Amino acid sequence: MLNNLLFMVINLAVNAGSWKDSLPVVLYGMLGIFIVIGVIVGITYLLNKLTSKKPKNDDKDE
């Protein structure tokens, strides 16, 4: 009984056919994560450039 139950759990956990269905979903999810991180980095870089204070040029007096 216990061996049969253990075999069923292992058989369900290592079903090779499920990889064909789940791998594209995982790849789309990872691609979405990288796109969102890229957008956040781009917005942060843009806001940093727009709001940074320009250093005063004191060399004009010379």
Image (cartoon, rainbow, N blue to C red):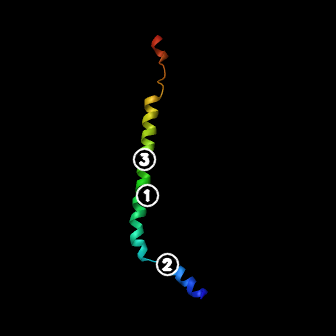
Residue that mark 1 sits on? 30
Which residue is rendered at x = 44% and y = 77% of the image?
Answer: 16
The residue mark sitting in front, 2 or 1, is 2
User: How far is the residue under mark 3 from the one under mark 2?
Assistant: 37 Å
> For this rendering, which residue is in front, 52 or 21?
21
Residue that mark 3 sits on? 38
Is any atom of residue 50 visible in this view? yes
Crowdedness near tag 3: few (<14), some (14–19) or many (≥20) residues, C-alpha within 10 Å:
few
Q: Quadrant of the N terminus?
A: bottom right
| Amino acid type shown at disc 2 | Leu
Crowdedness near tag 2: few (<14), some (14–19) or many (≥20) residues, C-alpha within 10 Å:
few
Q: Where residue 27 sits in the image (x, y, percent)? A: 41, 61
Residue that mark 2 sits on? 12
The reply to whether discs 2 and 1 touch (Cβ–Cβ < 8 Å) is no
Which residue is rendered at x = 43% and y = 39% of the image?
Answer: 43
Using the image, determine if residue 60 lies above or below residue 8.
above
| Amino acid type shown at disc 1 | Met
User: How far is the residue under mark 2 from the one under mark 1?
Assistant: 25 Å
Going from N to C along the chain, the mark reached first, 3 or 1, is 1
| Amino acid type shown at disc 3 | Gly
